Image: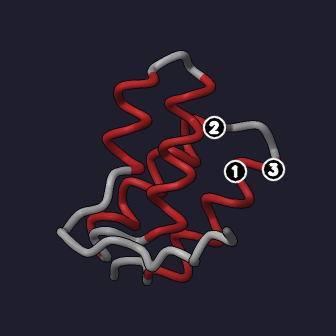
C-alpha cells in the first residue's frame, strides 16, 4: 500500500524537524510524484536546494509549472 499525499507531507515535516533533511527531501519528492506542482513540496525542495548552495536547482523547483501568472496587486501612484 502506498502512502497518501497527506501522509508523505506529514512524514517529511517530522523528518525535517528532527534534522533529517535527506529523508525529508526524499519524501517531498515522492509527494511531487503524487501531486506534480504541489506548492508546499516545491517550496521545501527549493529551500533545501538553496540552503545547499544550489540556486539554479532551487529556481527550477520554485518555477511555475504552467503559463499562469499570479495576480498582481495594483501599485499606488
Whether residue 16 sits left or right of residue 5 in the image: it is: right
Crowding at dot 3, Cα within 10 Å, few <14 / some 14-19 / many 20+, comes out as few
Tell me the residue that label 2 is attached to. Answer: 21
Quarter holding the N terminus is bottom left
Asked if the residue under mark 3 is in contact with the one under mark 1, i.e. CB atoms within 8 Å, the reply is yes
User: Given the current orientation, which residue lies at the most extreme top position?
Assistant: 53
Whether residue 61 sits left or right of residue 33 in the image: it is: right
Residue 58, how many percent across, how many down?
43, 35
Please name the residue shown 58% across and 48% down the image: 24
Please name the residue shown 54% across and 66% down the image: 40
Tell me the residue that label 1 is attached to. Answer: 15
Asked if the residue under mark 2 is in contact with the one under mark 1, i.e. CB atoms within 8 Å, the reply is yes
User: Given the current orientation, which residue lies at the most extreme front position?
Assistant: 77
Please name the residue shown 69% across and 72% down the image: 76
Tell me the residue that label 3 is attached to. Answer: 17
Q: Secondary structure at mark 1?
A: helix
Whether residue 4 sits left or right of residue 14 in the image: it is: left
Q: Count every numbered label the image shows and give the total.
A: 3
Amino acid at each position: 500500500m502506498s502512502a497518501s499525499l497527506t501522509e508523505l507531507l506529514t512524514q517529511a515535516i517530522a523528518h525535517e524537524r528532527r534534522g533529517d533533511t535527506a529523508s525529508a527531501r526524499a519524501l517531498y519528492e515522492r509527494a511531487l510524484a503524487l501531486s506534480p506542482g504541489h506548492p508546499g513540496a516545491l517550496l521545501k525542495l527549493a529551500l533545501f536546494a538553496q540552503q545547499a548552495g544550489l540556486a539554479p536547482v532551487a529556481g527550477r523547483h520554485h518555477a511555475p509549472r504552467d503559463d499562469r501568472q499570479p495576480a498582481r496587486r495594483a501599485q499606488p501612484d
